[in-house]
Image (tube, grey):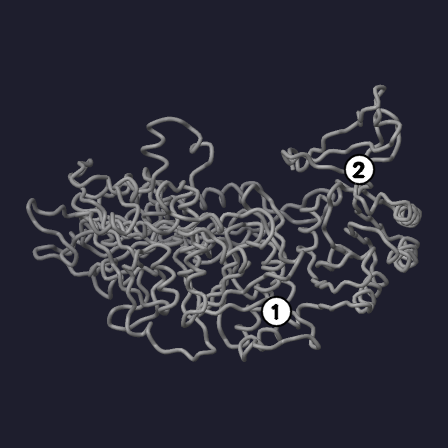
């Protein structure tokens, strides 16, 4: 959409854009704005007169057209809603009978805002995960409420103007056999005819109201599907959150403007969601028109591009967050362009940091991401800490938004919040950054799902240095969206070891540079969950209060030649009613104390399944360990050997999860930490991730018919069963030739 590019209605200038969103109005009145990109005076056209809002709008784009005088009836509902003043002014010379006629503008007349121009505005929804309440347009016309079924199972409409109520005969027919009274077929047919006539009138009224409105607000999706809205034309089209729309959607909207199009958005926030199969197509037309957003199409990808562009106006003053978050946003995305209003520079007490890095180092298995993709996954640490932070701020009357890059982590956290919810609703909003774009919260928890060990995930590799891939650049945009949703305090959950060792230029390196500066503090999660008798120094007032909240949700025991954990474990097993799942890599003398408990549980009808390391492990292959494993097999239903297994987990009744660093079947002298978490969804999610039900059913060897089957995983990620019977797996030449069988996990590869 270059400057002066002709459309069906004339030239369209380059979009206006800005590098930062604004919060409050420049005059200080009104609530904070949703956007973090600076003041939004450019978004508020001084337009009076009727306004139509077609259907449900997750966000609004305003477009306007020529004024058509005359009073119109209020819509019965449907896809549009209009707001008129107390009186409708007629034009000079317009008689009473001309109030409803359409008056095209006189040639050469300037119909700008306030002079009868018709503005149409379109806004992109906040993201693929955005949710909203149904608008009037989603309910039967004229009701403004949800439909109620009639006796015949169809919707019962209210009477439209000019329609008489259908006759209600007193007689009814009785269905043979069931004794229920039903309306005669003739009445049902008449009812259907009335309903169809009602819907036709509602559509006509809706179209007339939209045509007479000076301001039409809709989403891009409704814009192209609602005929009355799409027909236009409009003098001015404003597209909000233009960067989150696909290029064809923006072009379609701008084509309906006869004078001007203004695009508002942030090129450093998330772009449109494009299907992966389109990205893989090596076609010039797809690469030009479907993959880039409108800012990329106009040559704007960073703050310097925006400064140099002749048709781009940057709004640089923000009124949402304080100086620490602003410094982070400037280093991440805006190159120092962002400035704060006076209210954002208010001094804060030393123990009231604006950014808190919650360091997950030292939480062992709790902070180990479980991969669900090559660079994505979930972990228990984020759900646990986020739940405690929500409680901490909820007691202080502050709302919290929890943002994470991955949908699977959002699901786990949402379930953790459901465990303690009250009044039937969750304690906080949880979602991916796509869902929260355009939103703001007093407190934001950004769960990065980045642990110290294992593979680096998306946020660790996010950067926009020269040569960066679109995936790496989009990671920075996601990080920027998550950080700039906040008003008063931002929590970032992640491994300090991972963050401080990040490469220069990455998003994590910018965060690491701020830790220790005014308003930015690092808090060790390991200190927050330390048992009361252990070292709890240097937490401060804020840290001590958070540790107290965390203690309400977590049962943690430091073990050193004592049985506190095993006492809790025994209590949980004795209360179990359905199932016990154990992941314990090594089997040692500790198992002798556990076997009677498991034997008693199996005797009550519980299904007991245990996953251990296979005998290729040096410890497991010893004769004494093999003897203990045989005793274990004699007690429980299923024992599955797994190659190179390291998880330490207990799941009881698919509701209680005990997870951490303690090996239930072998621990003796080491100091360990185990966390007990309750929640049906979380427990099932963990079992699903471990493929527990599938892996608990090893097949017999198809060659020897034996049951000596172990579980392994190839380098390409494919799980498979393998027979480890010595006779069966040894070929005639003495080499290993073990039978194996691939496992289809979830209908495909793991």
The Cα atoms of the two marked residues, 2 and 1, are separated by 45 Å
Determine whether 206 is above or below 706 in the image. below
**Residue 163 visible in this rendered orientation of the protein:** no
Number of disc labels: 2
Query: Disc 2 vs disc 1: Cβ atoms closer than 8 Å?
Result: no
Q: Position of residue 133 (x, y in %)?
A: 46, 57
Q: Which residue is nearer to you in this view: 190 or 78?
A: 78
User: Residue at 76% across / 43% down in the picture?
Assistant: 693
Q: Which residue is nearer to you in this view: 197 or 285?
A: 285
| Helix, strand or loop for disc 1 | loop
Task: Check disc 2 and report the residue beneath it.
Answer: 710
Q: Is residue 622 left or right of residue 74?
A: right
The label number, if any, that marks residue 465 in the structure image: none
Q: Quadrant of residue 678?
A: bottom right
Task: Check disc 1 and report the residue beneath it.
Answer: 422
Q: Crowdedness of circle 1 by 10 Å Cα count: few (<14), some, many (20+)?
A: few
Q: Crowdedness of circle 2 by 10 Å Cα count: few (<14), some, many (20+)?
A: many
**Residue 722 visible in this rendered orientation of the protein:** yes
Q: Is residue 706 left or right of residue 295?
A: right
Mark 2 or mark 1: whose residue is earlier in sequence: 1
Which numbered mark, 2 or 1, is in the foreground of this view? 2
Q: Quadrant of the N terminus?
A: top left
Q: Quadrant of the C terminus?
A: top right
In the picture as drawn, the residue positioned furthest to the top comes out as: 732
Q: Which residue is nearer to you in this view: 28 or 162?
A: 28
| Helix, strand or loop for disc 2 | strand
Determine whether 538 is above or below 304 in the image. below
Q: Position of residue 680 (x, y in %)?
A: 70, 57
Q: Position of residue 741 (x, y in %)?
A: 75, 29
């Amino acid at each position: 959409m270059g400057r002066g590019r002709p459309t069906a209605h004339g030239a369209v200038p380059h979009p206006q854009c800005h590098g930062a969103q604004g919060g409050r109005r420049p005059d200080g009145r009104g609530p904070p704005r949703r956007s973090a990109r600076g003041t939004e005076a450019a978004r508020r056209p001084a337009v009076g007169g009727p306004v139509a809002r077609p259907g449900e709008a997750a966000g609004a784009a305003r477009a306007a057209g020529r004024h058509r005088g005359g009073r119109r009836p209020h819509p019965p509902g449907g896809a549009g809603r209009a707001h008129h003043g107390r009186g409708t002014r007629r034009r000079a010379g317009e008689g009473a009978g001309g109030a409803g006629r359409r008056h095209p503008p006189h040639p050469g007349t300037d119909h700008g805002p306030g002079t009868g121009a018709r503005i149409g505005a379109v806004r992109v929804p906040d993201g693929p995960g955005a949710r909203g309440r149904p608008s009037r347009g989603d309910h039967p016309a004229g009701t403004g409420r949800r439909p109620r079924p009639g006796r015949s199972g169809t919707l019962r409409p209210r009477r439209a103007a000019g329609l008489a109520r259908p006759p209600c005969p007193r007689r009814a027919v009785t269905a043979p056999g069931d004794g229920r009274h039903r309306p005669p077929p003739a009445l049902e047919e008449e009812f259907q005819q009335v309903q169809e006539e009602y819907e036709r009138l509602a559509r006509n009224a809706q179209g007339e109201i939209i045509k007479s409105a000076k301001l039409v607000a809709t989403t891009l999706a409704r814009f192209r599907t609602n005929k009355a809205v799409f027909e236009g034309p409009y003098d001015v089209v404003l597209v909000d959150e233009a960067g989150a729309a696909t290029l064809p959607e923006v072009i379609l909207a701008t084509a309906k403007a006869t004078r001007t199009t203004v695009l508002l958005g942030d090129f450093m926030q998330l772009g449109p969601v494009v299907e992966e199969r389109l990205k893989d197509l090596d076609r010039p037309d797809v690469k030009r028109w479907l993959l880039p957003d409108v800012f990329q199409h106009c040559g704007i990808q960073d703050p310097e591009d925006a400064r140099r562009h002749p048709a781009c106006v940057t709004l640089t003053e923000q009124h949402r967050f304080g100086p620490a978050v602003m410094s982070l946003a400037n280093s991440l995305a805006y190159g120092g362009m962002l400035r704060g209003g006076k209210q954002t520079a208010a001094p804060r007490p030393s123990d009231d940091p604006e950014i808190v890095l919650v360091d997950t180092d030292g939480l062992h298995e709790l902070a180990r991401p479980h991969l669900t993709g090559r660079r994505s996954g979930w972990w228990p640490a984020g759900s646990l800490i986020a739940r405690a932070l929500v409680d901490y701020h909820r007691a202080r009357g502050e709302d919290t938004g929890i943002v994470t890059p991955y949908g699977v982590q959002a699901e786990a956290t949402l379930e953790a919040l459901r465990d303690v919810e009250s009044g039937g609703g969750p304690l906080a909003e949880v979602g991916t950054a796509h869902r929260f774009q355009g939103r703001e919260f007093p407190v934001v928890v950004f769960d990065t799902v980045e642990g110290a060990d294992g593979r680096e995930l998306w946020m660790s590799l996010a950067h926009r240095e020269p040569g960066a891939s679109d995936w790496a650049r989009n990671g920075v945009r996601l990080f920027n969206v998550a950080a700039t949703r906040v008003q008063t305090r931002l929590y970032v959950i992640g491994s300090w070891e991972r963050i401080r060792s990040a490469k220069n230029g990455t998003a994590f390196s910018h965060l690491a540079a701020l830790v220790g500066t005014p308003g930015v503090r690092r808090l060790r999660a390991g200190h927050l969950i330390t048992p009361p008798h252990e070292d709890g120094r240097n937490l401060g007032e804020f840290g001590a209060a958070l540790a107290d909240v965390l203690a309400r949700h977590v049962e943690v025991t430091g073990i050193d030649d004592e049985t506190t954990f095993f006492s809790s474990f025994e209590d949980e097993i004795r209360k179990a009613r359905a199932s016990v799942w154990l992941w314990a890599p090594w089997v040692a003398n500790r198992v002798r104390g556990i076997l009677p408990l498991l034997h008693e549980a199996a005797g009550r009808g519980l299904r007991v399944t245990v996953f251990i390391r296979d005998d290729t492990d040096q410890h497991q292959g010893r004769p004494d360990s093999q003897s203990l494993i045989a005793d274990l097999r004699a007690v429980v239903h299923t024992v599955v050997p797994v190659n190179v297994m390291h998880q330490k987990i207990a799941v009881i009744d698919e509701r209680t999860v005990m997870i951490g660093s303690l090996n239930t079947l072998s621990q003796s002298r080491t100091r360990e930490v185990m966390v007990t978490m309750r929640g049906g969804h979380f427990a099932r999610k963990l079992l699903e991730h471990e493929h527990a039900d599938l892996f608990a059913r090893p097949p017999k060897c198809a060659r020897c018919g034996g049951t000596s089957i172990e579980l392994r995983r190839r380098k390409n990620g494919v799980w498979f069963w393998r027979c480890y019977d010595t006779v069966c797996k040894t070929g005639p030449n003495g080499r290993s030739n073990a039978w194996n069988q691939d496992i289809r996990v979830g209908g495909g590869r793991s």
